[in-house]
Image: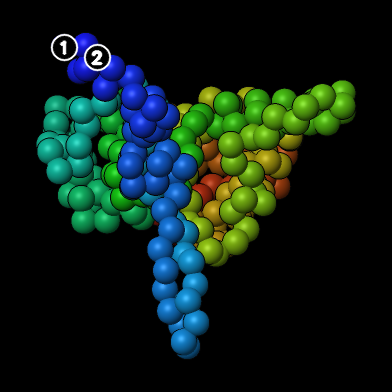
Amino acid sequence: MIQKILDQFSPESVLAPKYNCDLCRDTGRVYFAEKHFGRSYQIAKDCVCKLENLRRKRLSKIPPKFENALLSKLRPEPARHHRQTEIINQMKSAPFESYFFGGNFGTGKTLFLWTLYREAVMNDKRVVVCTLAELLHEYRTFIQCSINNQELVYPRLSAEDLRQDHTKFSIFLDDVDKAKPTEYAAEQLFELADAIYAFNHQIIVTTNLSLVKLVSHFEKADERYGGAIVRRIVDNSHIFEMF
C-alpha cells in the first residue's frame, strides 16, 4: 500500500507535463517533414485543437435566441413573410454568397444573418460580425487612443484588412441603418463597402429600411455617399426586401 502511494509521487509522474492536446502539446501548432527536390523541410500548421477552440469562441457570439439556428434544419415561416421559402432555398444553395436583408421587424432578417454566420464559422471562414454602430465606435476609439498617445485599441475590421485577395472575409453587418448618418460614418462605410466590393468578400447586411430609403439615410450627411455605398453593398448580393 505504501509503495503504491510512493509510486504516485515518483519523479517521473511529478515532472511529466500534462497537456490538453497531446498532438501539439498545447502550442496550437503541429510540425511535419516534407521533401522537395531532395531536401527536407519542416512544415507547420494550426493544430485541430486550435481550430476547434477558435470555432467555439466564434460560435459563442451567437445570441442565445439564435444558438440553435442551423441552415440544414431551417424551415420557412410564411406567416412571418411570404418570401421566407424563397430566401431559405437560396441560402441553402449558396450559403457563402452575399445577401442584403431589408424588412420590417419580425420578418426573419436577424435569424438569417446568424444562420449564415454559423455556416461560415463551421466552414472555417474568416468572420467578422457586429453592428455598424459598434464598428464605427471602434474606429473612433482607435483615433482617440492615437491622439492621446494611449495604447492603441485596433478595430475588429478595417478597409485595409480587406484590400487583399489572399484571405476572403465573411462580414456580417447587422442594423446598418442604426448608425447615425454623419459624414464620418458615411466616409468609413464607403471605404469598407468599396474594399468588400473590389476584392469580392462576402457581406451579409440587415436593415429596417428599403434600398431606396437606405440611400437617403446615408445621403443625409453627404449626398455623394448614399448611392455609392448601397450600390457597392448590393452589387454582388442576393437582395431580399420584406415589407
* Residue reaching furthest to the top: 2
Residue type at mark 2? Ile
Q: Where 70 falls versus 104 (above or below)?
A: below
Q: Are marks 2 and 1 in contact (CB under 8 Å)?
A: yes
Q: Where 237 falls versus 100 (above or below)?
A: below
Quarter of the figure with the C terminus: top left
Quarter of the figure with the N terminus: top left
Residue 12 in percent (x, y) is at 36, 31
Of helix, strand and loop, which one carries label 1? loop
Nearest the eye: 136 or 4: 4
Nearest the eye: 30 or 149: 30
Q: Is residue 86 found left or right of 57 in the rendered image? A: left
Nearest the eye: 80 or 10: 10
CA distance separating discs 2 and 1: 7 Å
Residue 164 in percent (x, y) is at 60, 61
Of helix, strand and loop, which one carries label 2? helix
Q: Which residue is mark 2?
A: 5
Residue type at mark 1? Met
Other-residue count near label 2 (Cα within 10 Å), few / some / many at <14 / 14–19 / ≥20? few
Report whether residue 182 is seen: no
Q: Residue at x 34, y 54 (%)?
A: 96
Report whether residue 225 is seen: yes
Q: Is residue 136 found left or right of 23 in the rendered image? A: right
Q: Which residue is mark 1?
A: 1
Residue 148 in percent (x, y) is at 87, 23
